[in-house]
Amino acid sequence: MIINIAILFFSALLGGLYALRASQTNEAHVKSILVFAGSFLFSITIVHILPELFETHMDQFRIGMFILAGFFFQQILEYFTSGVEHGHMHMHHHGKDHSAWSGISLMTALFLHSFLEGTILAHPDVIHSEHSQGTLLIGVILHKIPAALALMTVLACQYKNRNTQLMLLLVFAMASPIGVLAGHWLEPLGLISESGMVMLFAFVAGNFLHISTTIFIESSPEHQWNSKKLIISLIGAGLAIVAELFY
């Protein structure tokens, strides 16, 4: 668990620091990484998380409802994040709200999103085995690095003070590790039952489905044929399958 926490923290931190140090972030490269990460995450959700969720002895209708709830909850979060978690590098402010409130709402929504990501890595014995947990961790990391790049690009526009930018990056980097710790202790402390953990994981699976499918849609906004995108997507999906089979 400690290793997972460290990896999650430093992947987000280093991704954000790179964006601060780089004079200009190449959006084309970030989009390619996002397509790969989205394909990997989508494939892991389809071949790993969802089958193991439905193999539990919980009510399958309830599991499906929580997956749907997580999907639409992520859509609500994106109203406040403007899609930073899947690589948007420009804030689209709602109305004329350029105040500190927009930054607070952005960070609150991103923290909650990352926190939920962390909870699904907490209990390998609930829906996934110890060895297959690693493939899910890889998927989350691949998603967090470009998200951190996009976040720092947005924060650089909103906050000119470098210390403020670094402080907010640390908040973002700590969110998933805190989620891992919370997920690990919620059940032992009696705050949530085993069935509740399964429903929580179903909820996060819905988040993953929304994020990964949104990445695919937004990488070809005009729905034009893009062979590079297809190849990157197939590589991401193939590696996810290979990792699931042979990790």
Image (cartoon, rainbow, N blue to C red):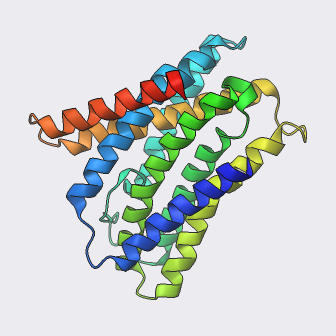
Q: Nearer the viewer, residue 88 or 145?
A: 145
Q: Residue furthest front?
A: 246
Whether residue 105 is visible to the viewer of this picture, yes or no, is no
Q: How many marks?
A: 0
Q: Residue 69, image x and y in percent?
A: 54, 31
Percent position of residue 105, x then y: 51, 64
For the question of whether residue 44 can be seen, the reply is: yes
Rendered position, 103 above or below 133: below
Residue at image position (52%, 57%) is: 110
Quadrant of the rendered image containing residue 193: top right
Residue lying at 44% horizontally and 78% vertically, measured from the top left: 99
Decide: is 158 above or below 179: below
In this rendering, position of residue 214 left or right of residue 220: right
Residue 112 is situated, as x and y percent measured from the top left of the image, at: 59, 53
Q: Quadrant of the C terminus?
A: top right
Residue that protrudes farthest toward the left in the picture: 224
- Compared across the picture, whether 242 is left or right of 96 comes to right
Relative to the observer, which residue lies in front, 209 or 126?
126
The residue shown at (59%, 32%) is: 203
- Residue placed farthest to the bottom in the image? 161
Residue at coordinates 61% horizontally, 18% vertically from top-left? 52
What percent of the width, then of the height, locates residue 229?
20, 39
Rendered view: 97 above or below 11? below
- Quick check: 209 above or below 82? above
